[in-house]
Image (cartoon, rainbow, N blue to C red):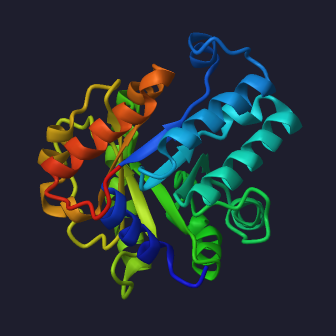
Amino acid sequence: MNESFGTRLRARLDECGPLCVGIDPSPALLHAWGLDDSPTGLERFSRTVVEAVGDVAALVKPQSAFYERWGSRGIAVLERTIADLREAGTLVLLDVKRGDIDSTMAAYAEAYLDRGSPLAADAVTLSPYLGFGSLAGAILSALANDAGVFVLARTSNPEAAPLQRLVADQVLAGVAAANAGHEPLGPIGVVMGATLPELEHSLDDLNGPILAPGLGAQGASPADVARLFASVRHAVVPSVSRAVLADPKRLRSRTLYFRDECAAHLDAKITTTT
């Protein structure tokens, strides 16, 4: 990689449209697919999703927890899933939500952002609740490895609102400072739920991508995304999981539906369609 994450993401959004698809192989979904809740079922689920959406989603977001629960066997499946996604040409956002200080944060960054790591992703999610400054090591590692991070700001789960309201502006200011001078998009993004009733914080100076979870099963629609992020439509990436994962036979068609609906509402042009 010689291009920054922001550059690669901008190109991918322009090519494929504004959509992130989550890979969330929960026990319930494995059973719904007729798969065993086992590392073998986990791998079949993951490969099916990669084959269906890897060439039409700008980002694909494996949820690390569903792999970690199987220990080394699950992590091996996660490594293969990341490799399969890279081969498919999509960008990999590993959903780990890590947050710690000093040497521990550096170790997380080495695991997920260092180019030589078998778990290296294009970007990861991070939690800022030990202080935004605690993420400095991971941000520096992301810059050094042409990777990115998405920092939790206002997530889609309603129980987070009282705490996140108090600190979101600090998080957004830190992200904006880290993205200063980067074009066309900074490599440091934020997570802002598409289910928020209103956007209480300004994103105009962010200069980075906005991951907007909550599309589909959590109740947000493409129209909601466009309304909520009206001033930063060019940078928003709606994220969908259960609404496309529920039926393996409709994985691709549902992904294309959400992608095209989001593109239409966000006035985004897709240079390739499939």
Q: Where is residue 235 shown, x and y percent of the image? A: 28, 63
Q: Is residue 56 visible?
A: yes
Nearest the eye: 48 or 149: 48
Q: Where is residue 163 shown, x and y percent of the image? A: 40, 40
Which quadrant of the structure image shows residue 222?
top left
Q: How many numbered discs sit on the rendered protein?
A: 0
State left or right for residue 149 relative to residue 13. right
Residue at image x 39%, y 84%?
182
Residue at image x 41%, y 29%?
244
Residue at image x 26%, y 60%?
270
Which quadrant of the structure image shows residue 219?
top left
Q: Is residue 125 visible?
A: no
Q: Where is residue 77 shown, x and y percent of the image? A: 77, 40
State left or right for residue 87 relative to residue 38. left
Tell which residue pokes out farthest to the front in this image: 274
Nearest the eye: 269 or 157: 269
Q: Where is residue 114 shown, x and y percent of the image? A: 72, 70
State left or right for residue 62 relative to residue 247. right
Q: Is residue 54 above or below residue 103?
A: above
Tell which residue pokes out farthest to the bottom in this image: 181
Q: State which quarter of the image contains the N terminus.
A: bottom right
Q: Is residue 37 above or below residue 131?
A: above
Residue at image x 16%, y 39%?
224
